[in-house]
Structures are given as C-alpha cells and as structure tokens.
Amino acid sequence: MKAIERLLLENKAWAEEHLSADPEFLNKLGIERECEIFWIGCSDSRVHADEITNSEPGSIFVHRNIANSVMTTDINLLSALEYAVDELRIRHVIVCGHYECGGVRAALRKTRPGQFLLNKWLKQIKDVYRLHRAELDALATEHERQRRLVELNVIEQIHNLAQTSTIQRAWTTRKAPELHGWVYGLDDGIIREIAHMDADTPLDPLYEFELGPLA
Ligand SMILES: [Zn+2]
C-alpha cells in the first residue's frame, strides 16, 4: 500500500476509534479552549509538540521550520507570533530544538551550491557558530560540537524573539509571555530547559524598541 493511501486509511481508523470510545470526542475538539502556549519547533518528523509533551489537541499553537529558527524577516513566523501573543494572549513561547538536528548538522558542512534557498536559511545557524567559534572549536568531537550548536542555536532564537516588537510590546503592556528555550533528546525522550527570558529580563539597549502610545 502507498504511504499516502495508508494515511487516509489510518485517519478513518483513528476517527472511528475515538468516536467509539467517546461519541462526543469531535464535539469536544470543536470547542475553543484557552491556549497558553506557542511552540516554535523543528520540522523534523520525529519531534511533535503534542506527542512529546502528552498534550491534548487545542492546548499548543504550533509553528515549525527547519532548525526552529526565529528570523525577524520571516513573515510566516512573525504573523503566527503576532496572532499568538496579541489575539490568543498566550503566556509562554517555547523554542524547542533537538539533538541530532539535520538542519544544524547541514549548517556545519560546507555550503552546497545547488541548494539556493536552503543555504540562505542555514546561514543564520552558521552565524551562531561564528559567534561562538572559540567555545565550539574547543570541543573534542564533531558530535559534541553538533550538540552544543543545537543548544546555542535555541538560545540565539530566544534572543531573536525578545528583539521583536511583538514581544517587547507585550512585555510592556501585560508582563507576558515568558520565553523558554528547550532542547529535546531523541535518545532519552527528555526535554531540558536551557534558556529563559521574561518581561523582567534586561535587554541589550541596541535591540530595544522605543515604544510609544501604541504600546
Ligand atoms: Zn531538527
């Protein structure tokens, strides 16, 4: 059976299984509930926000891209962030990276000439490496460098979030959301928090917005 046919068949089985266990299952899913979490994760097929946190549908608003990047020119991410912060009024933004990340691994290689768009995307991970070159070059193995770059990349994305007007405005007006940098271990299934920022965290003045009446 083709993979795509299997998906549709499994979907029917999933719907039937849940409805037979609870006839109100789909009606409950349709009810809007308070969503407190915005998750920015990697597109990697092994790292699903709901699954690894054992969360119910409706509890996490999700955005994913290669290597969980927060680029301040990415209108897709910034739109989702603005909606999550201003409309859903979420309390927490999580950037969740993961060890053994293919995006981070690719950024450690030489740039491949044919991958025009991917190269631009991965360049900012190379920039994270350059910022921390002394620490990373001092590590003994490629594997250690990869793992540490995953962590440093998550920390950098938390700073990128704090540099957006959306986050700074929300910190000024309602002292939320908190920003969390997490790394998920594919080998042990455990998430570790490695960075945290909130409305009381001092910002580098270079990145501070002059927030006027709109704030
Ligand atoms: Zn990844």
Image (spheres, grey):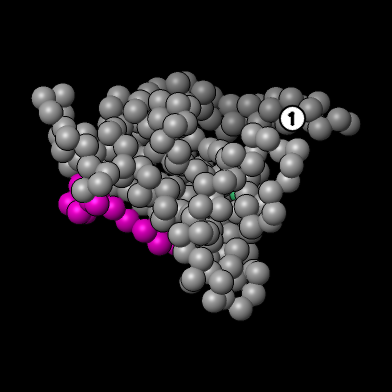
The magenta-colored residue range is 189-204
Residue at the image position 65 percent from the left and 39 percent from the top = 118
Q: Quadrant of the C terminus?
A: top left
Q: Tell me the crowding category of disc 1: few under 14, some 14 to 19, or many 20 or more residues within 10 angstroms, Cα based.
A: few
For image coordinates 73% across by 46% down, the residue present is: 112
Circle 1 is placed at which residue position? 7
Measuring 51% from the left and 23% from the top, which residue is drawn there? 26
Inspect the image, locate mark 1, and give the three-letter code of the amino acid beneath it: Leu
Percent position of residue 210, x then y: 17, 35
Q: Camera-side residue: 193 or 78?
A: 78
SS for tag 1? helix
- Residue 46 colored in magenta in the image: no
Residue reaching furthest to the right:
1
Position of residue 143 measured from the top left corner of the image (x, y, whole percent)? 64, 69
Based on the picture, tell me whether residue 195 belongs to the magenta stretch.
yes
Q: Is mark 1 within 8 Å of ligand 1?
A: no
